[in-house]
Each structure stands twice: as structure tokens, then as C-alpha cells.
Amino acid sequence: MKETRLENQIKRDMDAGLFKRRSSSALKAYRDAAKAMVKDKSIHLRINGRDLEALKSLAAKKRKKYQTYIGEILHREAQKAA
């Protein structure tokens, strides 16, 4: 089976030493961080129309979707409380 360009690039990068083996504790930390980022719940939220427009405007300035931006704000505040 012929290898793709990506597979060939990965092999070259491995040969060049660009990939490093990680310890099991580092892998566990990466796994835990990935699990913490999983979005497994949804909510329905009613907010003031002006607030929503302001949030959409802020999100657009950051080149993000407004729902993603609102989720980031909520996540940041939840982390402060934890």
C-alpha cells in the first residue's frame, strides 16, 4: 500500500527526532486534559437581546463563533469558582 504525503512527512519528522516519547504520567495528564474539554451537556439560555448582540460583536472581533465565545466565558468563570 502506498503511503500518503502526510505519512511520509511523519516518518521524516520521526527520523529527524522531532517526536519525543512521553512518560506515562505525561500521557495521563494529556488524557485528563482532553477529557476535561469534552462538551457533554447542552443548555437553553434566555438572555437580553442587547447583551447577545454585544457578545456576538465581541466574538466577531476575536474571529470566533458567538456560541463558542460564550462557552469560553462560562468555562473561564467556572474555573475561577473551582
Image: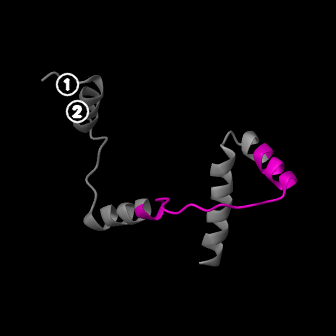
User: x and y percent of residue 19 in the render?
Assistant: 29, 44
Give the residue pinned by disc 2.
11
Residue occupying image coordinates x 65% and y 73% = 80
**Label ID, residue 21:** none
- Three-letter code for the amino acid on which mark 2 is drawn: Lys
Residue 19 among magenta residues? no
User: x and y percent of residue 10 in the render?
Assistant: 27, 34
Residue occupying image coordinates x 46% and y 59% = 38
User: x and y percent of residue 41 in the render?
Assistant: 52, 63
Residue occupying image coordinates x 61% and y 62% = 43
Q: Over which residues does the magenta segment extend?
A: 35-57
Label 2 crowd (10 A; few <14 / some 14-19 / many >=20)? some
Give the residue pinned by disc 1.
3
Label 1 crowd (10 A; few <14 / some 14-19 / many >=20)? few
Q: Residue furthest bottom?
A: 82
> Relative to residue 68, is residue 18 drawn left or right?
left
Earlier sequence position, callout 1 versus callout 2: 1
Residue 60, compared with residue 51, is above or below; it is above
> Relative to residue 43, is residue 58 drawn left or right?
right
> Whole-Å distance between the Cαs marked 1 and 2?
10 Å
Residue 38 among magenta residues? yes
| Quadrant in the picture for residue 1 | top left
User: x and y percent of residue 27 in the render?
Assistant: 31, 61
Report if the CB atoms under discs 1 and 2 are less than 8 Å apart: yes
